[in-house]
Amino acid sequence: MAGFMINIKIDGKEINIPHHYTLLQAAEAAGAKIPRFCFHERLSVPSNCRMCLVEVQVKGAPSKPTASCSMRVLDLRPNSNGDPPEIFTNTPMVKKLREGMLEFLLINHPLDCPICDQGGECDLQDQAMAFGRDFSRYTENKRAVEEKYIGPLVKTVMTRCIHCTRCVRFTTEVAGVSELGLIGRGEDAEITTFLEHAMTSELQGNVIDLCPVGALTSRPYAFSARPWELLKTETIDVMDALGSAIRVDTRGSEVMRIMPRINDAVNEEWISDKTRFIWDGLRTQRLDYPYLRDKNNRLVMVDWQRAFDAIRCAVVKAGQGTIGAIAGDLATVEEMYALKLLLKSLESDEIDCRQDGTALDPVWGRASYIFNPSIAGIEASDALLIIGSNPRLEAAVLNARIRKRQGLGPYPIGVIGEQKDLRYSYDYLGSDTEILSELFLGQGAFFGVLKEAKKPLFLIGQGALIGKNGTKVLKLTARLCCDLGAVTNEWNGFAILHTAASRVGGLDIGFVPTSGRNAADIVADSAVLFLLGADEIDLSAKKGFTVYIGSHGDNGAHAADVILPAATYTEKSGFYVNTEGRVQMTNRACVAPGEAKEDWAIIRALSSVLGHCLPFDSLHSLRLSLIRDYPHFGIMDEIMPGKADDIISLGQEASSVTTCSFTSPVKDFYLTNPIARASAIMAECSSLARNRLAMEVG
Amino acid sequence: MSIRRLAHESIQPRAFSFTADNLFWAEKTIARYPEGRGHSAVIPLLMRAQEQEGWVTKASIKYIADILSMPYIRALEIATFYTQFQLKPVGRKAHVQICGTTPCMLRGAENLKAVCRRRIHSEPLETNMAGTLSWEEVECLGACVNAPMIMIFKDTYEDLTEERLEEIIDAFEEGRESSIPVGPQNGRHSSEPIASVSLRKLL
């Protein structure tokens, strides 16, 4: 269809466009701006706000107002000579139409802008200013709508609703769960959930951004700031391994809210609720001073010098004993790199960034541990096998992309692992390695599906790679990929879905032990143990002196002998590599509280106390050194692709596996990292989700 | 038009299920739609539930949404959109729907409404004390040549006078509705002229 081009005159300007374009697309191609409320690029077209009316002028007939979002150029009645009619977006008629539509919309819209959280960033406000009349002719009573409860995250003031139905379409089409609906009709139409149940989607926060008025606003952010007093910093999210593009809004040193940015390669323009509502966790449970464990086994506040002295004593005392380091899920590449160099100077390679003990290892090449087809590549694939993952909880935005792909056309999805509601339909194949072995032998109905597919995608979650069988499962899957033609020069369907933002970066710089040991061994054997924000690991077996460098008082800090307070992802600039292998950088939006410092600086200062001064004294020189060692960090926002040969050679080592079932490591979506566990909002969401689960089971 | 909400929780029955006959009918109805388009059967099914229960209960909305495997909110949208679905109990013996659109109004629908206000309840969609009767004004029911008219359940009663409406209401209340002929109440057949008109005379 794209081949049919057509000439059309818009505002007297002739342009050449594909004939399936809507008038709105055509007008934008011609440089005209069309106001709209209900239309949204990533949702279906309902054409119910009528704000986008344009004038269609057929020769020899009266001009007609036409909703430009839903009328296609090819559907227009041609002129007598067969040409499409002329379109106008700036005539007195259009001006009058827009004034009329806004007048209708404002009939029932309250005049409460001064107390409305949308004030200052409201589509209705802006468009009323730009296109509306300057006074109201309406003297009758305004409609009022009863309050609705739709959950702890989205606050509703339904009297402000203009019935654009963007929220209804978003939950149904993108989030994949029909929770919101428009009940009643006409003036009495109301947006609500069934019987005012709380919404369950992990992406529900996006309806706040979609709402063009103040009907749906952020409940945690309510009445706390105005958009014009916020400092906006563009940065990257670290709540999951996707690295969604976000904007952090700060006032002074406090993060007031987090919003999505558009990045079509990663998150389009959605973010998960954890990404959006985590910010209250950035203020609570913070480690703001160094702490040292005293003789009474209590952590007491000390200054940096005493904390460093205690570490030096412990390192000296350790002597020939091993010194280990574990990097947590939120660590930046720079601080891991600095810590690695420090440990190297202490003649130790007991370092690991894989707290969960996943089987991934950089020795098998970069392709073996990244999401090779890329997130946008999901849309190019034509079949999907999910192994040991629940993408809805592990990467909610990526899950929406899978759902989007299914909406584009036939897309068979098979799942090996837990049978959960993923928000799209799939074939449940089974829970364990047995199914994988069967596929490997060419058995089962889904084998045929994968065989027939030209670009099959194998999504391998950490649930499949954790545990004794992890390595074997990884190799077997690699072999399966190769056998089914998923690994070629054009298409690499071997896709590892990570759950930790720091993981790919850590693997890239080789933050793993060469001895084949794992994180649990390092914890158990180290005489001195450095924890770089490592809170997801079982520390009960640790024996040695423990140093915790991190931002929140969580598992790691509780077990520590020395606590060095560090910065969170909004308080430092650092590299993160997302699950696709895309290098991205966070920007500092505010400063860390109290005595807390950026992690790399802490490690640099510690290195000089320990007499092994690291060869850099600024973040810039650290990065130069990092890029010298690992050149791909020099190219931001790009993916250094993995080699198909890595997967092929990995697959050649495949052997049979003993039976074990896969379970996703993410049990509770809302509480996966120390910042989330410090957040009251996340705790409330988590308890709601738990109750819901208990209700379903009971 | 007014805001349409589900009836108060205190009068909602706990459960709903189709009778065996209705279930058989529902399956046949769903089968009329193409594979995967069964959702389209939601309107006839809700109507059948209303005929079975007398009104559309919350339990019946959930039951039908479950049968059609559609989200509850989608079925609720339908049930609240169409005013033909009664969301709270109406008269058990008769729910009088008075056509109030222009031709009927010109021919005396206002007077019929006054009768209902007096005999049944001062407000539409409220039942009388016994819960047997209720009334409402509806839009055109398509019998304009026989105006004014009413509809009770699936039958229409046309060419009404106030007195005749009272008789009809009495008959329904006493369970004698079968004694009332359906259609014109003034003796004429269908919508033919009331008096026999001689074509020759006219010419």
Image (cartoon, rainbow, N blue to C red):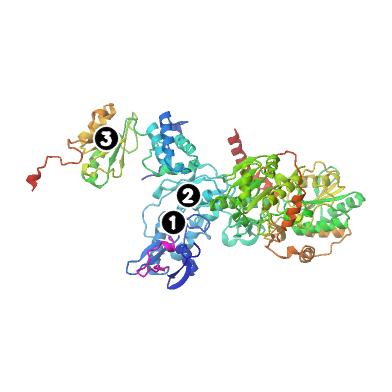
Magenta span has A79?
Answer: yes
Residue A553 showing in the rendered view: no
Image mark count: 3
Measured Cα–Cα span from mark 3 to mark 2: 38 Å
Q: Which residue is mark 2?
A: A158
Magenta span has A651?
Answer: no
**Where residue A667 is drawn, which disc sits there?**
none
Q: Main secondary structure of the magenta part?
A: loop
Query: Are marks 3 and 2 in one subunit?
Result: no
Q: Position of residue A239 (x, y in %)?
A: 67, 52
Residue A139 showing in the rendered view: yes
Which chain is home to disc 3? B
Q: Which residue is mark 1?
A: A47
Would residue A141 be found to the left or right of residue A658 on screen? left
**Where residue B118 is drawn, which disc sits there?**
3
Would residue A502 be found to the left or right of residue B156 on screen? right
Q: Residue at x 27, y 33 (%)?
A: B119
Looking at the image, which is closer to me, A510 or B92? A510
Amino acid type of the residue that numbered disc 3 sits on in the rendered structure: Arg
Q: Which residues are magenta?
A: A71-88
Looking at the image, which is closer to me, A307 or A485? A485
